Amino acid sequence: MARLQRFAALIFCVFPLSAQVATLEKRFAEIRKSPGELHAFLYRMPKGADLHNHLSGAYYAENVLKAAASQNICVDVKALRLAGPAPCTDGQVSASQTQTDNTLANSLIDMLSMRNFVPSAGISGHDHFFDTFGRFGAVDTTSLIQEVIARAADQNESYLELMALSGGGAPAALGKSVGFDSDFNAMRAKLQSAGLERVVAGMRVRVDQIEAARTAGCDAKPTPALCGVKVAYIYQVLREFPPEQIFGQVMAGFALAASDPRVVGVNFVQPEDGLFSMRDYSLQMRMVDYAKKIYPNVHISLHAGELWQGLVPPDGLRFHIREAVEVGHAERIGHGVDILFEKDPYGLMAEMKAKHIAVEICLTSNDGILGVTGNEHPFPVYRKYGVPVELSTDDEGVSRSDLTNEFQRAVLSYQLSYADVKQLARNSIEYSFAAQDEKAKLKADLEKRFAAFEKSVR
């Protein structure tokens, strides 16, 4: 009798849950037919983490212009770029004018982002996208980090890994000062003698500055949502540099990530189709392999396969993801768009599945930069062959997107179910570089958020 009672209790518990799931799926299928309702649903839905987010490209142009005005920056009216601090010279006006001149403001917003961009014979989406970063570099955007955190909080995100630290300054200069040596041990020794630890210490100070801007106000009058979003940082190696400067960046970045728990990983950035990126790709992966042996606990996520037919010669599509996985020790792949042009793509995906190497999918970015959408995009192929995927924004300000939009785009493009989007959110926490105890808390918190959200769905 006791056994029967336990069985009955089990049936009682399971069937209401199944009914709830079925009801949610039915409701989601209905909402999927109405993009506006779908967006409202996904905006409130817990989305876990954004793991591929370049902080420099996450700010919306409107806020960059406000910062430029407050910093007394000048605008080059002809080139439509933020030129530098006042006094302004001929052909320049104060950025404060963007707060009263709608025509000037709109022209600048279009040039600082992908808004209203239409590819032409003169410039591609790829070129326009990457050109935007040189147009607002004169502005100190450190304080704008709270814009990014607030947007994440509003969308029910719980964790961010922000690519916020660049090796293009002192680390690259240190590498240039010692010159390239194919003997990595010898070159590392030269870097240490030339002041590698001093450079790493300087980057820790930069982390302090970013953290101070992020947490400003959290001690006095904390905003629960804004101050409750967990944030970690990724160090970026700028891959469009000569080998000696790449090596300096790699060694500094790995040393920083190994010594500062706020910096949870290392990545390679800049256009993958660039001169140095293509010519030295294999050499760069060997540098990562070398650094990983010295700093085995440092996490690695690599932009790899952010390429497409015609952008590079056919042979340039054949090896980047594989070398990132097999030489560069990538635990996550950023973009991975050209996977089906790799040598033995199915074998590579089987390897990625077996090693639990996740792909950071950035649908809006891949459309704007590469023109890859719909069935051309490998997102459904990765899922078909069991490679873990999660959705990210890449450069949400420049792309005029956010994580909700990435989920909506995935749902509408690939007819995802509610169970599918829930798994994507879970994946974003599972494949994060958060410490294990922190990850366990994030997982538990995500499930609580889902329980509350699902209870509120009408």
Image (cartoon, rainbow, N blue to C red):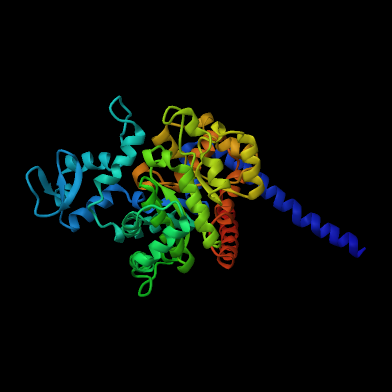
Task: Tell which residue pokes out farthest to the top in this image.
Answer: 121
Q: Nearer the viewer, residue 453 or 53?
A: 53
Q: Quadrant of residue 207?
A: bottom left
Location of the N terminus (image quadrant) = bottom right
> Residue 439 location, x and y as percent?
57, 63
276 relative position to 61: left or right: right
Question: Residue, x 21% and y 54% (percent of image)?
Answer: 68
Task: Tell which residue pokes out farthest to the left in this image.
Answer: 90
279 relative position to 63: left or right: right
Q: Nearer the viewer, residue 46 or 305?
A: 305
> Residue 344 location, x and y as percent?
62, 34
* Residue 408 to residue 260: above or below: above
* Residue 118 at least partly seen: yes
Question: Residue, x 81% and y 60% (percent of image)?
Answer: 9
* Residue 431 to residue 385: above or below: below
> Residue 205 location, x and y as percent?
34, 68
* Residue 38 at least partly seen: no
> Residue 98 location, x and y as percent?
17, 47
Question: Residue, x 35% and y 60% (percent of image)?
Answer: 146
Q: Nearer the viewer, residue 53 or 230?
A: 53
255 relative position to 58: left or right: right
Task: Tell which residue pokes out farthest to the bottom in this image.
Answer: 220
* Residue 312 to residue 205: above or below: above
Question: Residue, x 75% and y 51% (percent of image)?
Answer: 15
